Image: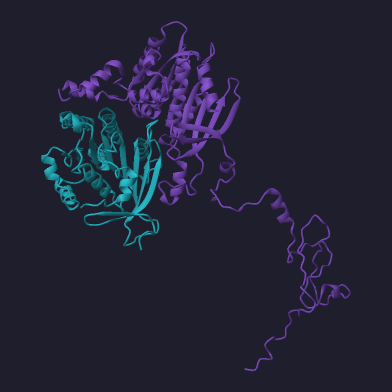
Amino acid sequence: MNQRSSNLLDEALGLDQTIEPWPLRGRAVVIEDRVETSGSFVLHHLLKRSLSPNSSNVSIFIAFAQPFSHYDRILRKLGCNLVLQRDNSRFFFFDMLMLQCPGGHEGITPEGGLIALYGKIHKTILALPEVSRKNVSIIIDDLSLMEVAVNGSSDYVLDFLHYCRTLTSEFDCSLITLNHEDIYSSADRPTFLLQMEYLADILIKAEPLATGLATDVHGQLTVLSKSMNYGQESSRNNTSNFHFKVKENIVECFYPGSRG
Amino acid sequence: MAESICRLLRDGALEGEHAPALTIKDSIASPFGFHVFAHVLSQLSSFILAGKSQSRGLVVVCFSRSPSFYLELLKNKGIDVVSSDKRIQTLDCYSDPLGWKSRLTETGNFMACSHETSISRTTNVFKDVKHMDKLYNSIVELGKGLVGGGKIRFSVAIDSVDEMLRHASMSSVSGLLSKLRSHDQVSSIFWLLHSDLHEAKVTAVLEYLSSMVAGLEPLHQPANGQRGDMENFSLIEHNLKKGKFHVRFKRRNGRVRVMLEEVHVEHLGVNFTALSSEGAINQGLVPKVQFSLQLSEKERIDKANVVLPFEHQGNGKPIQIYDGRRSLADSKHERPVGATETVQTSEDSGRGEIIYYRDSDDEMPDSDEDPDDDLDI
């Protein structure tokens, strides 16, 4: 019934072939967007795919941006019930909206806050049954707000991401993050952004069209997929570029010029 | 050229000299640094296992990938990992670089699973990357454990200087690297650096510390140099498959040799080839077409020699420009009246000229007469 809606995005990520074993496992997916073109729909799409009924994937969602009800509403439109998934222990929601690490004498230090968060994620994964432990997605929405929560120190965020990264090699988790490209544009050396791009196995960029606004096209997506798995079939660098249109309960992806 | 790098690392250090050191640097536009690092690593380890190199052991300091990744990598390259255990050791700065896991364990919030504890028993987990002195001691200790004391040497590979620089100051990192270079049991050392993450001076310092610098650059620079311009999508796609491999060797006497190659990323790692002429000449990424869009040197000279009819060459000789009224033969006998232009002839044969033959004398030359004056409208 639910035919593959945005084939191009799925294809670019390798999600069109199989959903189990989870094609993104062991990989870091970095989504970058701009203020004119939100990339959160990619996050929602990946969340929906990972919670698809014919797989045993588990998602750990670390939300700095929106409350649970927001994601629940959106995913419901996409045909996925987060409350149900949460009750089935397939969706773990960490509400970090209130996380603030002011440093100083009282309260938690930025590092302490992130260590505790890492500990929680690790504990959650360990508590899972052996079968689903192999197919965990850690989703962070979004990194810039995480940076704000730890007092603007991107070093702590990178430390935290490194520890999340170790989870991907220990448990074959996938790590999916969202970040905003343009807030680093004034810096002469966008180090944090570059660090993320080096870390990424798959980089997804959501950008407005170079030609300006259009009603039929909301923006373009570029997917760069690097692979370092020597001697495996997936060892190839893939790139794809296509346009998208975000609709109420579907995202349409198509090649430039293929839509009137 | 990539082979000569590996050879130099294999041959190791001379008595009373610093060990040869290699910096592999890349940038986000051509991010193959790790591929090259993996290539050098596997070459050197196969030399060491075959007993062909000066060094008898290799210490891999892992910051950006897990030790098991490297074991897998070497296994895929056909290097026997089990027997290499006594020759190749990893120092794990990846699993718990800041000691978070031990801190969580202390407070009772962390349970290492069986899988993890088995890892930490076989490898050497380093938990304090902020202290370069401790890191130095661990590397040397590990190396000595591989080769024993005395005069036998070992090699060191560091997979990310960027991580080190994130945790420690520039001076302490360069101090560690130069101490390693001058250690009398180190045969060779190499490290990977993402140059665009740091200021230019950091890259320069690390290049001074090394006797070889292997840089990776994109074959085609984006025209406007702007980040994230997806209009250049095909360019990006192109640059993700191959790049320029630029190596600088520094000899002891100060002679510097620079070489250039092309690097391709392939199914099984990287491949080095001579820089193709296409890449060398067509820097502007001219699209591949059937016909030639560019002139050869001879064609360019010939083209420059053609005298165009409107050009006043000014060598004093009168030349008639065919004005369409009479044939050239006629005008040879009479001086053109009112033709004030003095244009040069094209007498020397080296120059090009434009020759015009009128089809026939029957053809009426253009005149001021209105050709339509017989029309009865």
Color style of the picture: by chain
Near-viewer residue (B235 or B229): B235
| Residue B296 location (% of width, % of height) | 67, 49
Q: Examine the rendered structure and indicate whether residue B135 appears above or below residue B230.
A: above
Q: Residue furthest top?
A: B150
Q: What residue sits 24% from the left and 54% below the top?
A: A250
Residue A15 visible in the picture: yes
Image colour assigned to chain A: cyan
Please tell me which residue is depicted at 36% across the width and 17% down the height of the picture: B133
**Observer-nearest of B162 and A236:** A236
In the picture shown, does residue B57 fall above or below B286?
above
Give the farthest residue toward the left: A87
**Residue B14 vs residue B263, the one in the foreground:** B263
Residue for point 76% across, 76% down: B324
Query: Residue B217 appears at what percent x and percent y?
Result: 49, 37
Res A108 visible:
no
**Residue B207 at x, y percent in the picture:** 49, 27
The x and y percentages for residue A15 are 29, 43
Q: Which chain is purple?
A: B
Task: Please state if B89 lies on the left or on the right of A147 as rendered.
Answer: right
